Amino acid sequence: MLPQPVLIIGTYDKNGKPNAMNAAWGGQWDAKEIMIAMGAHATTENLNDCPDFTVAFATKQTMVAADFVGIVSAKNDTDKIAKTGWKCEKAENVNAPVFTDFPMTLECRIKEKIDESEEGYYIVAEIVNILVDENYLAEDGKPDMEKMELIVFDPIHHGYIELGKTIGKAFSDGKALK
């Protein structure tokens, strides 16, 4: 599926240490839920201990560190998060870290695990809260995707692509053909 979001999943390990991983196989499941395909990762183990996590959306500015947390496991590098340079706070509504370098973060809680096996599982999670840095709000007070400089993953060429400008109005422009 093209394009794929670059999602940074934030969890705490059993000792309360923040961890993050890069996940591209996910998206909105429902108006208040998301779905993410999880492999066998340190993050998956953390989610087995606590169903709470955060999802940040990678940007042009966070791309290098976002890629790093996707290729380096906390199982192999205990200093992983420090190397990203990301600032971290505890989420207000879930037991998970918020990496404040990202313009928008979802606070989430697992509702259901699907097809659980040794290789991982799919999670369906409730979006408990949405955090948006006020610098990334549009004039109407809602998140402005253009200001965020979000990136997507290109699974064909293994690259990251920055999203561009708005070119139309959904649920509106097509009415011209009625």
Image (tube, rainbow, N blue to C red):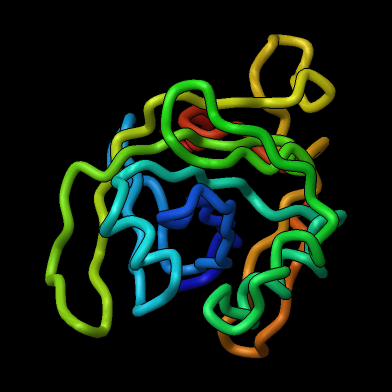
Q: Position of residue 36 (x, y in %)?
A: 36, 59
Pick the front one: 127 or 50 = 50
Residue at left offset 52%, top offset 55%: 9
Can residue 166 be seen by looking at this rendering? no
Q: Is residue 160 above or below residue 93?
A: below
Q: Is residue 113 left or right of residue 48?
A: left
List x then y, in percent, for residue 83: 81, 66
Q: Quadrant of the N terminus?
A: bottom left
Q: Residue at horizontal 47%, vertical 37%?
A: 177
Name the quadrant containing residue 105: top right
Residue 155 found in image quarter: bottom right
Q: Nearer the viewer, residue 136 or 94?
A: 94
In the shown orientation, is residue 94 left or right of residue 106? Answer: left
Residue, far front: 15
Q: How many marks?
A: 0
Which quarter of the picture shows residue 97? top right
Q: Residue at the spot x=57%, y=67% of the render?
A: 22
Quarter of the picture containing the C terminus is top left
- Residue 176, image x and y in percent? 53, 32
Left or right: 155 in relation to 65: left
Q: Which residue lies most toward the top here?
A: 140
Relative vertical location of residue 116 with respect to residue 114 in this rendering, above or below: below
Q: Residue at x 65, y 63 (%)?
A: 152
In this rendering, does residue 112 appear at all?
yes
Residue 152 or residue 171, whichever sits in front? 152
